[in-house]
C-alpha cells in the first residue's frame, strides 16, 4: 500500500525533536592525576580519656582544596591538627597512620618541628607577630638562614601570591597589627607561603572576617589551589561549596566521638550526597 | 532538632502550586478536546482565553523558585526540588499552549464538521492526560517506578499518532479536497503527541528529583 511505503509522519516531514538531551552523569573520579599528598588510615585521637575522633581513613588529593565540614564538636579542628602533629602539643594522643608524601609522620625518629615547617597553618583569628609587615613574612626565612637578598625576593613573591602586595608594598615597614582583619589573614597566608609549604592547613580562616574580606580570602584560596594542597576546616557550608574540590563530612556519635560520614567530590556532596546524614546536615535539617 | 521548618513549608507550598498548575492544564486539555468533539466554539474560545491564567501561574511559580533560591541558598535535595519544580512548571505551561492550540483549531474549523468521527484522537487525549496525572502523582509520591512507567507509555501515544496519520493520509490521497480538514485533525493529533512527550519530561524530572540523575528515559519517535 502507498501509505506503508510513505512511512510515518516524521519520516516524511523530517521534524526535529524538541526534547533536550540528558547527560551521562558518570560519577566523578576521586583519584585525581596528581595523586595523594596525605593518606590517613584508622585515625583515632584523644584528649585525655575523651575520644575526639574515631577511625578516620581517607586520602587527601595533591593540589586542590579539601574542605572538612561538620557540626560543632565533631573533631574537625582536631583532625587537621593531627596532620601536622599539633594535636600532641595540647596533650592529645593519636593512634593510626598518617602518611605525608609517603612518609609516616608518627614514625619513630620523625622530627615534628621539621614536619611542621613543611606544613603551613592558618588559624581562625589572624595572628600576625607585633612586628612590621615585612618581618612577619621574613620571620621563618631568617630562622632558615636565607640571605638578605633572597629574603626580600621571597617576601615580595609571597605577598603577591597572597594577593596583598599591591595594598602593602609602600608600607612594608609599618606594624602588621595596623592592617585590617582580612589583610592580616592574607599576611598570615603569605607568612605560611614564604617557607614553601607542601601542605597548607586552614582552620576556619574566615570566621573572624567580614563578608568582603571572606570572599577575598576564598578567591585567594582558589588561586593557591593550582599550586598547593590545602585542607580547610569550615563551619560555613557555602564556603566549602565555593572553595573546595573535595569535601569531607564529619559528625559525631552518641559517645561524642567524631567520625567520617562521607568524602567525595564537592559538586556531588552539595548536589546529591550519598548519605542521608550528609544531606540532613548540609540542607540544615540537622546540627 | 527540627530546623528550617519555614523553608520546608515554602517547599510544600511550591509543590502545591505546581500541582494546581497541573490540574489547570489537564482541565484545559480535556475542555479543548470536548469543544472539538461537540463543535462548541464558545467553549473553544474560553480555553483560548483561560490559557492566560496558566501562563500567569507558571510565572508565579518561577518567581517563587527564584526567591527561594536567592533567600534560602538551597543545596542537594532542596536544590533538586526547586530545579524540578521550575522545569515541570515550564513543561506544564507548554502543555497548556498545546491545549490552546487545539482550541484554536476548533475555531478555525468553524462550523465545518470534522472530516471523520473522532476515535483515536480522544484515545490519545485520554492516554496523554493519564500520563500527565500519573507523572504528577509520581511527583507527590517521589515514586521513580511510577515515573518510569509514564515514560514507557509514551510509545502507545506515538502508535496512536501513527494510526491517525495513516488514516488521514488515506483520506487526502483519496480526495485532495479533504486536505484542509484532514490537516486540522492532524494538528490536533500532533498537539496531543507533544503533550504526551511533555508528560514524559515531567516524569524524567521526578526521576532526577529522587535520584539526582538526569537522563532521557524514552526517546520519542516524534
Image: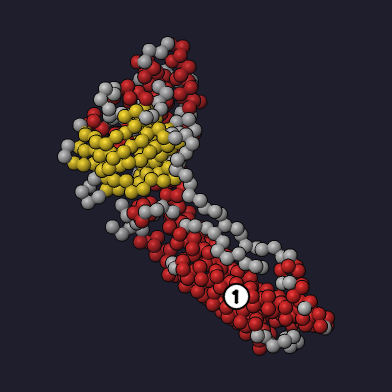
Report x, y in % for residue A41.
31, 38
Q: Quadrant of residue B128?
A: bottom right
Chain identifier of the residue bearing label 1 in the image: B
Report x, y in % for residue B124.
62, 79
Above or below A154: residue B3:
below
Q: Residue at x 60, y 69 (%)?
A: B197
Please tell me how crowded label 1 is: few (under 14), some (14-19), or many (20+) other residues with Cα within 10 Å.
Answer: some
Q: Residue furthest right?
A: B176
Quadrant for the N terminus of chain B in the image: bottom left
Is B55 on the left-hand or right-hand side of A137?
right
Report x, y in % for residue B92.
57, 69
Q: Residue at x 72, y 72 (%)?
A: A8
Q: Residue at x 37, y 25 (%)?
A: A118
Q: Residue at x 24, y 36 (%)?
A: A95
Above or below A35: residue B73:
below
Residue for badge 1: B156
Amino acid at each position: 500500500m502507498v501509505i506503508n511505503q510513505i512511512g510515518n509522519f516524521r519520516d516524511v516531514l523530517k521534524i526535529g525533536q524538541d526534547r533536550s538531551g540528558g547527560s551521562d552523569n558518570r560519577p566523578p573520579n576521586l583519584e585525581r592525576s596528581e595523586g595523594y599528598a596525605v593518606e590517613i588510615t584508622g585515625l583515632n585521637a584523644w584528649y585525655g580519656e575523651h575520644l575526639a575522633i574515631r577511625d578516620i581513613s581517607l586520602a587527601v588529593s595533591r593540589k586542590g582544596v579539601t574542605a572538612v565540614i561538620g557540626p560543632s564538636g565533631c573533631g574537625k579542628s582536631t583532625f587537621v591538627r593531627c596532620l601536622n602533629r599539633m594535636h600532641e602539643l595540647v596533650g592529645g594522643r593519636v593512634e593510626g597512620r598518617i602518611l605525608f608524601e609517603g612518609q609516616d609522620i608518627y614514625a619513630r625518629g620523625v622530627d615534628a618541628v621539621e614536619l611542621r615547617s613543611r606544613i603551613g597553618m592558618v588559624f581562625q583569628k589572624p595572628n600576625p607577630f607585633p612586628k612590621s609587615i615585612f618581618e612577619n613574612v621574613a620571620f621563618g626565612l631568617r630562622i632558615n638562614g636565607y640571605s638578605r637578598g633572597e629574603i626580600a625576593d621571597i617576601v615580595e613573591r609571597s605577598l603577591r601570591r597572597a594577593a596583598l602586595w599591591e595594598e602593602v608594598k609602600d608600607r612594608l615597614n609599618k606594624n602588621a597589627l595596623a592592617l585590617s582583619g582580612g589583610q592580616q589573614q592574607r599576611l598570615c597566608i603569605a607568612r605560611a607561603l614564604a617557607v614553601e609549604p607542601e601542605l597548607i592547613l586552614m582552620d576556619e580562616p574566615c570566621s573572624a572576617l567580614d563578608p568582603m574580606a571572606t570572599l577575598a580570602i576564598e578567591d585567594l584560596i582558589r588561586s593557591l589551589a593550582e599550586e598547593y594542597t590545602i585542607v580547610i576546616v569550615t563551619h560555613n557550608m557555602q564556603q566549602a561549596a565555593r572553595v573546595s574540590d573535595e569535601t569531607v563530612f564529619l559528625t559525631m556519635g552518641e559517645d561524642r566521638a567524631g567520625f567520617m560520614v562521607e568524602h567525595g567530590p564537592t559538586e556531588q556532596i552539595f548536589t546529591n550526597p550519598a548519605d542521608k546524614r550528609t544531606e540532613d546536615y548540609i540542607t540544615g535539617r540537622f546540627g | 532538632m527540627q530546623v528550617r521548618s519555614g523553608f520546608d513549608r515554602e517547599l510544600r507550598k511550591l509543590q502545591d502550586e505546581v500541582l494546581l498548575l497541573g490540574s489547570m492544564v489537564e482541565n484545559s486539555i480535556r475542555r479543548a478536546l470536548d469543544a472539538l468533539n461537540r463543535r462548541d466554539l464558545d467553549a473553544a474560545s474560553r480555553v483560548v482565553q483561560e490559557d492566560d491564567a496558566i501562563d500567569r501561574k507558571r510565572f508565579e511559580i518561577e518567581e517563587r523558585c527564584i526567591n527561594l533560591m536567592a533567600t534560602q541558598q538551597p543545596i542537594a535535595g532542596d536544590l533538586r526540588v526547586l530545579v524540578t519544580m521550575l522545569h515541570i512548571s515550564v513543561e506544564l505551561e507548554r502543555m497548556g499552549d498545546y491545549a490552546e492550540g487545539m482550541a484554536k483549531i476548533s475555531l478555525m474549523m468553524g462550523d465545518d464538521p470534522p472530516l471523520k468521527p473522532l476515535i483515536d484522537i480522544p484515545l490519545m487525549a485520554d492516554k496523554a492526560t493519564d500520563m500527565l496525572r500519573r507523572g504528577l502523582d509520581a511527583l507527590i509520591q517521589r515514586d521513580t517506578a511510577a515515573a518510569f512507567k509514564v515514560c514507557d507509555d509514551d510509545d502507545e501515544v506515538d502508535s496512536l499518532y501513527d494510526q491517525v496519520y495513516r488514516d488521514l493520509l488515506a483520506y487526502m490521497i483519496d480526495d485532495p479536497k479533504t486536505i484542509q480538514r484532514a490537516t486540522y485533525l492532524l494538528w490536533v493529533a500532533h498537539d496531543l503527541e507533544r503533550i504526551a512527550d511533555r508528560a514524559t519530561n515531567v516524569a524524567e524530572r521526578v526521576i532526577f528529583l529522587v535520584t539526582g540523575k538526569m537522563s532521557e528515559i524514552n526517546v520519542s519517535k516524534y
